[in-house]
């Protein structure tokens, strides 16, 4: 009887070890596994239906950044969007989570990390989508978007959509919140030797004057919300980087080019998939 119980315990323990081992392998090699399955077996349908694929592609075609990519660039972008969708938990809070909603939000994250191979916005685990701005007890006012230190993102869907419907006005809620999440994923500090952290430090050092100008009321380029603090200035910079790159580069080259290094891309280079 005892022997039988011991055997059952040993089998259970072994099964747990195997599960943990496979989980770790999958986590580390997740993108390689997806890439292999999708590209070599052509089997994105292993994960999603043909109709779903068509629906996601139709939504992506509405996004300016995606439309300017080459055929290969579009394939890679699509692949990363699907990986993002599959790895995040979306929750519709009073709103139906259509393909349009999930595609636009996922594309916000992919746009930032498109040229940073192997980098994912890991910080975010749960994305709550609302039909409008919502009251936040944390900040004590209505918010269109929020990214918490605990890995939860709140997004107002109409504002996400507006961000992509007007791709050249320097306001994009999806990009803004993903920019916060991007930094929270890196967790850079003054001692960080990570290549991206070093470039963020360069951006920060070079942006002191423009931040001060904004705090003094000069909203000729950056919107006033960026004056709230350095973190908001960061996200507002990233919105402008993607939506008004030409003007940004001419007015503030000292902070535009460090951002190119951060994201390993230059939004001006539409002929080469934004490569630098
Ligand atoms: Zn913000």
Image: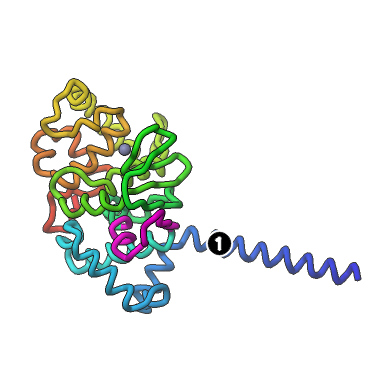
Compare residues 158 and 63 and report the one nearer the observer.
158
Quarter location, residue 184:
top left
Whether 182 is drawn above or below 69: the answer is: above
**Left or right of residue 240: residue 45:** right
Q: How many numbered marks, from 0 up?
A: 1
**Left or right of residue 5: residue 165:** left
Whether 144 is drawn above or below 81: the answer is: above
Identity of the residue furthest to the right in this view: 1
Identity of the residue furthest to the top in this view: 216
Quarter location, residue 198:
top left
Percent coordinates x, y for residue 89 in the rendering: 45, 57
Compare residues 269 and 229 and report the one nearer the observer.
229
**Left or right of residue 18: residue 252:** left
Quarter of the picture containing the N terminus is: bottom right
Please check the rendered image and state whether residue 102 is part of the magenta-colored stretch, yes or no. yes
**Left or right of residue 251: residue 74:** right
Residue drawn at point x = 55 percent, y = 59 percent: 24
Residue drawn at point x = 40 percent, y = 47 percent: 153
Please check the rendered image and state whether residue 148 is part of the magenta-colored stretch, yes or no. no
Query: Alpha-carbon neighbours of circle 1 within 10 Å: few (<14), some, or many (≥20)?
Result: few
Q: Is residue 115 visible?
A: no
Residue drawn at point x = 12 percent, y = 49 percent: 268
Q: Which residue is mark 1?
A: 23
Percent coordinates x, y for residue 105 in the rendering: 31, 55
Percent coordinates x, y for residue 109 in the rendering: 32, 52
Q: Which residues are magenta?
A: 88-106
Q: Is residue 210 visible?
A: yes
Q: Is mark 1 within 8 Å of ligand 1?
A: no
Compare residues 268 and 133 and report the one nearer the observer.
133
SS class, disc 1: helix
Residue drawn at point x = 37 percent, y = 44 percent: 181
Compare residues 119 and 91 and report the one nearer the observer.
91
């Amino acid at each position: 009887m005892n022997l039988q119980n011991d055997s059952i315990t040993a089998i259970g323990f072994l099964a747990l070890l195997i599960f943990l081992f496979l989980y770790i392998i999958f986590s580390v090699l997740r993108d390689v596994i997806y890439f292999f399955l999708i590209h070599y077996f052509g089997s994105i349908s292993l994960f999603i239906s043909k109709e779903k694929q068509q629906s996601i592609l139709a939504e992506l075609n509405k996004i300016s950044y995606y439309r300017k990519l080459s055929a290969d660039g579009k394939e890679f972008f699509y692949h990363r969007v699907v990986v993002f969708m599959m790895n995040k938990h979306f929750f519709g809070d009073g709103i139906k989570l259509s393909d349009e909603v999930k595609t636009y939000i996922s594309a916000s994250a992919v746009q930032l990390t498109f040229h940073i191979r192997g980098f994912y916005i890991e910080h975010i685990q749960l994305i709550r989508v609302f039909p409008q701005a919502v009251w936040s007890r944390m900040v004590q006012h209505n918010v269109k978007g929020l990214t918490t230190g605990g890995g939860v993102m709140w997004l107002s869907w109409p504002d996400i959509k507006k961000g992509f419907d007007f791709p050249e006005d320097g306001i994009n809620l999806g990009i803004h919140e993903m920019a916060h999440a991007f930094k929270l994923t890196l967790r850079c500090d003054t001692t960080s030797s990570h290549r991206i952290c070093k470039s963020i430090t360069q951006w920060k050092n070079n942006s002191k004057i423009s931040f001060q100008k904004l705090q003094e009321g000069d909203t000729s380029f950056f919107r006033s919300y960026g004056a709230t603090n350095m973190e908001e200035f960061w996200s507002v910079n990233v919105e402008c980087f993607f939506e008004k790159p030409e003007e940004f580069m001419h007015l503030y080259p000292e902070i535009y080019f460090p951002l190119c290094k951060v994201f390993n891309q230059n939004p001006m280079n539409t002929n080469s998939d934004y490569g630098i």
